[in-house]
Amino acid sequence: MRRLFVAWVSLLVVAACSTNPLSRKYEYEEEVYVDLDGSAIVYVNAAVPALVALRGVDLPLDPGARLDRQDVRAIFETPVSHVANVSLSRRDGRRYVHLRIEVDDIRRLHEAAPFAWSTYRLDVADAGAVYQQRVGASAGRGVGEVGWNGSELTAFRLHLPSRVTFHNSPSKEILRGNIIVWEQLLAERLRGVPIDIEVRMDSDSILQTTLLLFGAMAVLVAVTFVGFVWFVRSRGKEEPAG
């Protein structure tokens, strides 16, 4: 149920961003919706040259060449990651791939080759939860001249399930919906400059808290309604006797 909710919200976010001319453009982006039980939905949006250079995969660099969705799916489909959707696009003379990946346990995602450059840790206790990710060296594979000018960006975006009490993003910002972004120049990512991600948050998810609140309100309304009906009936019985 939560995954359906996240997917629906994600579609709205993507639709909104696609109509926003000021939205950030990344050559490589990992967007993670993580839950406190360790499950996650990961979106990968990447230019094919960036995916080849950073992860060392075999995909055609020629923007005019045929790009098979099944070849892209096969790269990311592993025992710890399931590809739910693959789509393609084109921008600035380069081909882009967009994947929606379902993960049962984010702590095992490093076992999938496309994500092996990262280590993931999620610890949940009564006092709070801690999410940590370290992004290490890239494949550093040469791709020749693909139109990059040195200003290209990469991003690692987190959507957190509960109230954030600490994070180490250089932006110092928490965007609406508990979204935190770590950006890095593509040139630095190609050189393998590490990214250390750490977030501390409450151990109760916002969704769970919201559902409990709505449940409590529903019970309160029901009790109030029953009390009102009882009051009306009791008044009705008293009036003839008077």
Image (cartoon, rainbow, N blue to C red):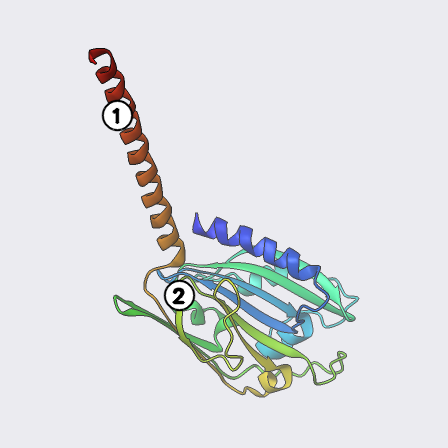
If the image is split into quadrants, where does the C terminus sit? top left
What residue appears at the point 54 percent right and 66 percent down from the top-left corner?
Answer: 31
Question: Does the CB distance between marks 1 and 2 fall below 8 Å?
Answer: no
Q: Is residue 22 visible?
A: yes
Q: Is residue 209 above or below residue 162?
A: above
On the image, the x and y values in percent for residue 185 come to 62, 83
On the image, the x and y values in percent for residue 80 come to 43, 62
Report the amino acid beneath label 2.
Arg
Q: Quadrant of residue 241?
A: top left
The residue indicated by pointer 2 is 163
Q: SS class of the residue under badge 2? A: loop
* Left or right, 22 with reference to 156: right
Q: SS class of the residue under badge 1? A: helix
Q: Is residue 167 above or below residue 36?
A: below
On the image, the x and y values in percent for residue 108 come to 39, 68
The residue indicated by pointer 1 is 230
On the image, the x and y values in percent for residue 71 come to 62, 61
Which residue is more in the foreground, 7 or 117?
7
What residue appears at the point 26 percent right and 25 percent down from the top-left corner?
Answer: 230
Which residue is more in the foreground, 241 or 48?
241
Other residues around mark 1 within 10 Å, as few (<14) / some (14–19) / many (≥20): few
Disc sitting over residue 75 in the figure:
none
* Tally of numbered discs: 2
Q: Is residue 68 visible?
A: no
Q: Quadrant of residue 96?
A: bottom right
